[in-house]
Image (tube, rainbow, N blue to C red):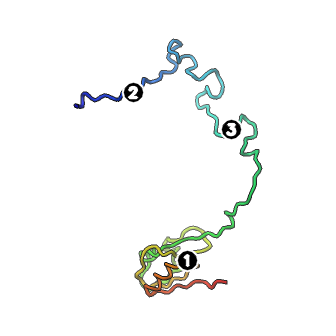
């Protein structure tokens, strides 16, 4: 096999469809678009769901049910690996310090510490919630975890 003997597979190459090349070409005159109308015009396309001006189905159906998205509790999570990277030994970690370092940015109701990664620094952590593994690793590193009293 040599480069000059290579050919594409049978049927892999097609002749370009030449539209509007005279009536005898088979695709002349209207070029396969039929006569007049929106779909025959350049840029003429109908958006999905359009029903010719009739009230579309998605507007005819009744709105039903309840969506809890406005009322759900928004939780921002921080992992121990991030605390290890951004905080120095003996620092206090709270929502304000996490926002200052860019670890919590969006609006949230609860800041929760999760146990992913290792923590080797002694930190005082005052957040709203923490996972069991995070609590264990913080205490193992000699740090303290301050959670608000449940009740």
Mark positioned earlier in the residue sequence (3 or 1): 3
| Residues marked 3 and 2 touching at CB (< 8 Å) | no
Quarter of the figure with the N terminus: top left
Give the left or right position of residue 81, taking residue 4 as reference: right
Give the left or right position of residue 92, taking residue 44 as reference: left
Q: Residue 72 at x, y = what percent? A: 66, 67
Residue at 49% across / 78% down in the picture?
133
Give the left or right position of residue 51, taking residue 126 as reference: right
| Residues marked 1 and 2 touching at CB (< 8 Å) | no
- Res. 95 mark: 1
Q: Residue 124 at x, y = what percent? A: 49, 85
Where is 8 relative to 138, above or below? above
Q: How far apart are the alpha carbons under marks 1 and 2?
A: 63 Å
Q: Mark 2 falls on what kind of element? A: loop
Where is 120 relative to 27, above or below? below
Where is 87 relative to 17, above or below? below
Q: Which residue is mark 3?
A: 50
Give the left or right position of residue 60, taking residue 88 as reference: right
Q: Quadrant of residue 73?
A: bottom right
Q: How far apart are the alpha carbons under marks 3 and 2?
A: 37 Å
Q: Mark 3 falls on what kind of element? A: loop
Labels in figure, total: 3
Of the two numbered discs 3 and 1 in the rendering, the one whose residue sits closer to the viewer: 3
Q: Which residue is mark 2?
A: 13
Q: Residue 81 at x, y = what percent? A: 43, 74
Q: Mark 1 falls on what kind of element? A: helix
Q: How far apart are the alpha carbons under marks 3 and 1?
A: 48 Å
């Amino acid at each position: 096999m040599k480069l000059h003997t290579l050919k594409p597979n049978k049927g892999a190459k097609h002749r370009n469809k030449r539209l509007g090349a005279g009536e005898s070409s088979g695709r002349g005159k209207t070029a396969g678009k039929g006569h007049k109308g929106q779909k025959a015009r350049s840029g003429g396309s109908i958006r999905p769901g359009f029903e010719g001006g009739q009230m579309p189905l998605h507007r005819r159906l009744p709105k039903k049910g309840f969506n809890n998205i406005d009322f759900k509790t928004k939780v921002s999570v921080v992992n121990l690996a991030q605390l290890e990277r951004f905080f120095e030994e003996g620092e206090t970690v709270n929502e304000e310090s996490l926002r200052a370092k860019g670890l919590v940015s969006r609006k949230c109701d609860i800041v929760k510490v999760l146990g992913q990664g290792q923590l080797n620094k002694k930190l005082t952590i005052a957040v709203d919630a923490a996972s069991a593994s995070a609590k264990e690793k913080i205490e193992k590193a000699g740090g303290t975890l301050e959670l608000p009293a449940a009740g």
